[in-house]
Structures are given as structure tokens and as C-alpha cells.
Amino acid sequence: MTSDANVSVRGTGGAIFAATLMILGGALGALQGIALIAKGTYYVQPANYWINTGASTWGWWHLIVGLIVLAAGFGVLSGAAWARWLGIVIVSFQAITNFLFIPAQPWWAITLILIDVWIIHALFVHRRVEV
């Protein structure tokens, strides 16, 4: 994080941990996407699910979102304000994606949703102090 005097001490540790979780979560999301693209039988679509897409579509979506979360995590770690806001937005998309993925992998998706909510909270708490 930056050593600027205008940075609030409150939430700095949480933002660093959130950035670390974003890097880890983005990498895992990208690997999940690659697994879905490479081996479509990894994903079993539930019967009568309202989203009718194949494993490849889910895979590309997880891969793209995962790579953006990974990049935003490195940006948050470097202290960039744009990365913090991008992180909030893209981690929200990741949480929504995992919400839609609950019927296919419920425990993994719910775990990632809880982590995403914590990351969003940590990125909102960490802010610059107005002078």
C-alpha cells in the first residue's frame, strides 16, 4: 500500500488481505474456467435449470472474470484507487456468477460468495482520508 499520509489506517490490513484473496481467487477462477473449457464433463448442468449454457460458456466467463479479478488484486496491492473500485465491481460480478453456479457446485460457490462479500467489505472500508 502507499505510504501517503492521507491513507486511513483503518482497513489497510484488510485491503492487503483482500488483494491477496483477489489474486488467489482470480487465479482459481481462471483455472476453473480452463478446466470447464478443456473438459466439459467436469460441469454437469442440473435438470430444468433456467440458464441453458454449456460448459464452454461457463468456462470462458469464469476465465475472463478470474483474470480481471487477478489483475485488480495486483492493482489493489499496489495501492491504485482505480483497482479498488474495479475490484468492488468485478468481485460483485464474481459473486453473482457464483450465485448462478450454486446448482452445479453448491459448497464451492457458497464459499466463494462469502469470500467475495468479505472482499467487497474490506475494499469499501479502506479509503483515503479527506483533508
Image (tube, rainbow, N blue to C red):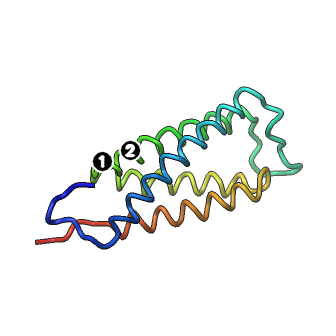
Mark-to-mark CA distance, 1 and 2: 6 Å
Q: Amino acid at mark 2?
A: Phe
Secondary-structure class at tag 2: helix
Query: Residue 16: x, y in percent?
Result: 38, 58
77 to 60, vertically: above or below: below
Q: Nearer the viewer, residue 95 or 47?
A: 95
Query: Residue 28: x, y in percent?
Result: 60, 43
Location of the N terminus by quadrant is bottom left
Side of 3 relative to 48 (left or right): left
Side of 128 relative to 99 (left or right): left
Query: Residue 58: x, y in percent?
Result: 68, 39
Task: For label 1, count other residues whose C-alpha is less than 10 Å away and answer few (under 14), some (14-19) or many (20+).
Answer: some
Q: Amino acid at mark 1?
A: Ser
Query: Residue 70: x, y in percent?
Result: 47, 42
Label 1–label 2 contact, CB within 8 A: yes
Q: Which residue is mark 1?
A: 78
Disc count in the image?
A: 2
- Label ID, residue 74: 2
Residue depicted at x 16% and y 66%: 6
Q: Nearer the viewer, residue 92 or 114?
A: 114
Residue depicted at x 66% and y 39%: 32
Residue depicted at x 69% and y 56%: 109
